[in-house]
Image (spheres, helix red, strand yellow):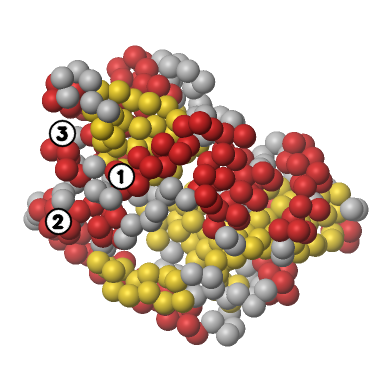
Amino acid sequence: MTNAAQWELQTVRTIAELDALRSEWIGFLGDAPEACGLHDWTYFTALLHREDSEPLVVVVRNNGVIKAIAPFIRCSGTVPLRLSLIKLGEISLPRLRVVGEDFSIASDVDASDVYRRVFEELPRATSVAVVEAQEFAIDGRFCKCVDADGLRGTKWKRSPTADAQLCHTIRFPPSFNEYVGALKSRDRTNLRRRHKKLAAFFDGDLKLVRISATEQIDSFLLALDHICAETWQSQVYGRRTRSTERERRFFATLVELGWLRSYLLFGKEQPLAFQVGIQYPGRYDFLETGYDARWSHLGPGTVLEYLVLEDLLSSDRPDVGDFGFGDAEYKRILANSTHFEFEHVYLRRRWSVKPKLVFGAQGMFDMAEKGIRKILTMTRSDRVVRRLLRRRGRGGET
């Protein structure tokens, strides 16, 4: 075990400092068997440029050698207050967001010691009073080390309003036929029926296009803008333009890394649905899915995911597919593995009145939503209410 007396901590606050660390960073990740894939140096810097943000990275060394990297992005935007899909307002609140689902830590050091040292260093490195850790598995290393009194004695504590949700993944079998064969008979029949119905509507001219090359980026982003303008999410949460130079550079970096694996579904050359996804060693992340709600009665989103899974299992098959935070119906149908994840918020113990009020209020809204949802489910009226909430988005698939 490494001698604790030899610990040294470096805080990286600018992209220029990050550039100077490049070769050492890459070398460490190459030697760390449990390194987080999203901590790839090229990806992390591309993410910073995409969000126009600055880094705050705590680098932990022992005897001059990197033993851990804890990367954060400094966020200066607003935090929305919501009750289900209803936006009640938003408040400006600077915060740090953990990148990935963990810190990257060498196998020959005590991980719990690293977490403690990183959180002890943060108050010296920044005045920001909020740390967000999104989509962290409850049974993962981060939660086990940090949440089990791991921050006791530091200047941080976890907000009691952390939101736990059931999340879905796919452990990919060797073939698509094996995957489909393991689905429930009813679900398998419904998926095939929807695929057949959608194809018939467009006279058999239904096409899935994989997006993985530089020359496809411009048309892909334009198609995203076209589809997103008609999704219920954009009507409820607001539209975000994708066809920008910043987005083009980010997707070009994904191509450079060999990570870009996104999809478009067309019916007679008309874009119907999209899947933004990335594939890095052993893993596929379903980052964002959307469909043109004008065709919701034909289920283009579900058909898209069905065809995407067929493609994922046909070539360059990943080990795991992660649907991300949330317990949507299509995820329950398509996934074959589940786990619980937390959306954590860590607050400074002092000088954090505003964050405590913000996340305390959101916690109350979340509790109210869960209570209302439970009542609606018991009375079997949840789908009706969901459709009403999405009316501005022209409905959704069921």
Kind of residue at disc 1:
His
Would you call the spot at circle 1 few (<14 residues within 10 Å), some (14-19), or many (20 or more)? Answer: some
SS type, badge 2: helix
Q: Which residue is mark 2?
A: 391
Kind of residue at disc 3:
Leu
SS type, badge 1: helix
Would you call the spot at circle 2 few (<14 residues within 10 Å), some (14-19), or many (20 or more)? Answer: some
Kindly indicate the quadrant of the structure image that contains residue 328.
Answer: top left
Q: Which residue is mark 3?
A: 298
Which residue is at a point 31% across and 30% down the rendered structure image?
Answer: 265
Kindly indicate the quadrant of the structure image that contains residue 289.
Answer: top left
The disc label shown at residue 226, or none: 1
Spatial CA span between label 3 and label 2: 17 Å
| Number of numbered discs on residues | 3
**Residue 114 seen from this side:** no
Which residue is at a point 15% across and 33% down the rendered structure image?
Answer: 298
Residue 275 vs residue 8: left or right?
A: left
Return the disc, 3 or 2, that comes first in the chain's sequence. 3
